[in-house]
Each structure stands twice: as structure tokens, then as C-alpha cells.
Amino acid sequence: MNVETAVRRPDEATDAPPGRTDAEPVPVIPTPEPVVRPTAPAAVEAGGEIRIKDLSVYYGGFRAVRDVDLTIPPRAVTAIIGPSGCGKSTFLRTLNRMHELVPGARVEGSVALDGIDIYSPEVDPVQLRRVVGMVFQRPNPFPTMSIYDNVAAGLRLTGRHKRSELDGIVERSLRRAALWDEVKDKLKQPGTSLSGGQQQRLCIARALSVDPEVILMDEPASALDPIATLRVEELIAELRRQYTIVIVTHNMQQASRVSDRTAFFTMGDERAGYLVEADDTVKIFTNPREQLTEDYISGRFG
Amino acid sequence: MAGATLAAQPSIAARLTGSRVGSRRKVVDRSMRTLALLAALLCVVPLIAVLAFVAANGISALSLDLITKPPKALGTGGGALNAITGTIQMVALGAVIGVPVGVLGAVYVGEFANTRSARIIRFCADVMVGVPSILIGIFVFTFLVLPVGHFNAFAGAVALAVIMIPVVMRTTEESLHLVPNALREASLALGVPVWRTTLSVVLRTGLPGILTGSMLAFARAMGETAPLLFTALGSRVVNIGDFGRQMDALPLFIYVNARQPVDALNQQAWGAAFLLLLVVLIINIAVRARSWGQRIG
């Protein structure tokens, strides 16, 4: 959408995640040769790799998600798909410890962001969330704030802003969220005056303003109309070179359009969600390893 | 007429339209509805009666003197300036003490307390709204008047604060309850600390409701008489700013002057009553009109 986005990390351009053509619905041709993915050595320069080991999530005595082993590559889009109630959102929220807002929620196992366990006592969840941002299902701009203030909120409320830099950061964030041209003349109007799709992109701009490495998206387009959905998907495509993006969606077409990698979750015994398999999106949608995945992809359940 | 199997049954037409079908029920229904309507009207009558009565008697007593002059030291005449200034000062100080306590208490109950303790505190606040205000007067009297040995306006302001706290707390809590959780999450997900989220997002979003509650508490405290009888006591001189001494208030002014066997003083009481009613009514209407507009808008 805009060229400016490429500026953030210029050396990133060469490190593009493979296996992804354009915004075509379902890729028909499976890639024959094993694809090269950025792994540990590459992750040193491209930060934002998440390694999840043996992760289980509990709400009190109820185990909502069990035994997830998953590596989320940096600077790529990872989609999490699966039927309702399989713990996709719960899992997503453990990546920036938002699940801790629910009393009694806890995890076992480890989540390492660039090698640092985010559940170790030294890691402050407040700091973590500045590195791992989040976009929610329903657009949730602050109703008392203007468009400008909504974007600036992340910096103002975390006390990290220099007044002189604020204008620049707000503009850059809005440009990255592909919203600048639509709102540049009405920055003082309330954020809630925008349309639903614009509000969601405003929320993305707000998340970008604090300069995260990882962006978690919890069904970011499910409350939007098709055109607004398309714009959000285009935006995700723009952002994938600069951020590690994890997107939960129950829309399989969307997963196939926007993601480089796909992880398929489903619900197992005692209603505990678990990871069935994770692979390159093309592989998952054309030639999955597990029968369960194929059944779900082809619409036989879920 | 009827089939063999349904010999005992009258026809459907007869069952649906028979003249006596449900007629008794209809009569009872209509009379009970009328009764309920009368009861509802009866609820409104006192308000209108009081308004009309006070207005009729007070409007003639309303004069510039009433709001600009203190009572004369000797004889009759003068105005209620001592009471007006006293009410403003004590209610203001009461709000300065009571509103922060009420708001902060609501933040605790609404944002941080577990369900059990929240329910207990909420229950206590509800009970406190219903505690006879004279008891609050006596309570403050024992703590802030007896030790210093004389009636004082500070004790009056504290007594009013005690009355305002539960009102502010409950209305604030309700308005915080209306703040969508998604906003708290949005803020926390940005890495905003909890305290800052509470202050800049939750309280900020609930601010209209908090103001509404504070204004209602303000109006309520303005009309309180009993707590002030034991604390500020009343005064015939204008007391500006000396909270260590006695101070007058509109309800006290009304109480004292209405009991005098002098018509001129009774008239002043009517005037003060009308003034008080007017202010309280304006606050109430303004606040409700505002929240009304919000609900529609």
C-alpha cells in the first residue's frame, strides 16, 4: 500500500518467508521441494521468533489447551485455525500473557521469545506486552480519545513519549496501518467516528505505535464486512516483513490468503484443545500430514 | 352438531365467543389496572404538592435581600447569606473529602476486589445509604465535636461527606461496570500498567457517570439537616472559611426560622426553602437530562 513500510529493517527484504504466492484463495500446486525457513541462526538478526514447548493452559482445574509444541518463525505470518472452542484464542493470549487477566488462569511449559522465557520471574508482563502487541476481534478504540490520541495512547500511557516525537510516530503508525490518507484531515475527531474497518486499522496503528516485535491478532476481521476484511488482509501482507504476526482465524480461506505458516488446533479429550500439526500454509491446505487436518480443511467437521 | 366422540364439547365457535367467557376476569383485570394507575399517580402527587406548596409560599419571600444579606443581629429582616455561604462551603468540603473516597472505593470494588468482598462492600454501601442521617450526625459528633468541645463546620462537612460517600461509590461503580472490558484489554495489551489503565481508560471512560453520581450526592448533602444539627449547629453570622467555628446552612436556617413565632422569620424560612428546592431540583434535572441524552445519543 505504501512504500514507506519497507524502511524499518532494510536487511529484512532478503529474508522473505517462502512458500507464499499472492493473495490467491487456495494455492493449487503444492511446492515440491522442501522449503527453506528461517531457523535459529537467522533468528539472531531477525528477532521475534517464538518457541513454545509443552505448553498447557489451565483455567483453575480445567485444562483448556494441552501440550503445544510450536515454533513461530520471525517476520512471517502464522495462522492458527481450528473449530470453535479449541483454545485458539486462549493459546494466542498466552503469548503476551493476556490470559492472566482471567483469575485462576495459569500455564505450564515454556514460551521463549528470542530465547527468553516470557514466563520467567524476571519478565514483567507489562513490558512483555510492549514487545508483543495485540489486536482484538472487535475494534476497540478508546471512545474518549481522538484518532490522534488513540494512536498516541500507547506511548502516552506508558510514559515513554517525547512530545516532539509524538506527531511523527502517530503519522508513521497510521501510514503503516494504511489509514493515514483517510484520517489525516480529521485527526482530532473521535476514534469511534470511523467505520468498523477503519477502527480496526486504527487499533492496528495503535498497536504498532509502541514498536512491537510481535503482533497477535485474534480474529481481527471477523467483525468486519468483506471489503474492510480485504483491507485488513492487505495490511497484514504489508506488515509481515517487519513483524512476527500470529493470527487466529476461523476463516480457512483467510488463513490460506494471509499466512506463511498454519497451525491447526482442535479439541481433544475433556475439551482440551491441542495442536494437531503446524506446517507451511501451502502444505497444510494441499497435502496435510494428518487425516484430522484434511477433514477440517475439506469441511468435514468444525 | 357435535361429533360422536366429542359429545360433551360445545362447538369451537361457542367456546371462543361465548358471552360469559372470561368476563369476570376482564372486570378484575380492569379494576386492578385502575387501582395500580391510581397508586402510581399517588406517588407523584406529593412531589407536585410539595413543589406547589413551597413555591406558592416561598416565591413572595424570595428577594435580593435574602441572598445578599445576613440576618439582622436584632429584630427581624435581613437575609440568608449566612446559610447560603455555609451550605456552599460545607457541601464543597464534604465533596472534596467524600468524592475521592467514594470513587476510589468504587475502583477497588469494581476493578480489584474479588466477587465475595465486592459483594460485602457493595452491601454495606447500600445499607449506609439507608442509615438515618441523624445517626451519622451523632457519630461525627462523638468524634469531631466532643473532643474539641465546641460545634464546628469541619464536623459538618465530614458528616456530609459520610452521607455522600456511599452514593458516589455506588453510582461510580455502576458507571465503571459499563466500561467495556475490551477497553481494559486494549490498554493492557499496549503494555500500559494497570494503574494507568484504570486512571486514563476506565475512569476516563466512566467519567460522565462519576460526575452524575457526584452531583446527585451533592444535591442530597445539600438538603441534609440532621447531621448538621449535631456538628455545624448553625450560626447567625456569615462564616467564610473558618471551619473551626459554627456555620449555618440552608436546612438549619429553615429549621430555626420556621419555629419562630414571628411571621417575618417564617417568611424567610419559606424563601430559603424555595431557594434550596430550586437548586436541588435544578441539579437533579440537569444531571438526569444529561444521562438521558447520553442514553439516546
Image: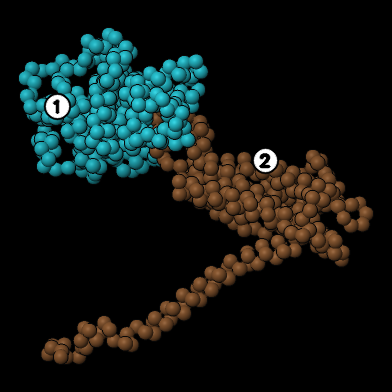
Q: Tell me the quarter of the picture where residue A94 sits.
A: top left
Looking at the picture, how far across and down is residue B125, in whole percent? 58, 52
**Can residue B106 be seen in the rendering of this structure?**
no
Looking at the picture, how far across and down is residue B62, in whole percent? 77, 55
A21 up-or-down from B297: above or below:
above
- Label the brown chain with its letter: B
Which chain letter matches label 1? A
Q: What is the distance, in whole Å, between disc 1 and disc 2 at their CAs? A: 63 Å
Please tell me which residue is depicted at 65% across the width and 58% down the height of the picture: B131
- Numbered label attached to residue B53: none
**Can residue A143 be seen in the rendering of this structure?**
yes
- Label the cyan chain with its letter: A
Which residue is the site of mark 1? A24
- Numbered label attached to residue B96: 2
Q: Tell me the quarter of the picture where residue B269 sits.
A: bottom right
- Frontmost of labels 1 and 2 is 1
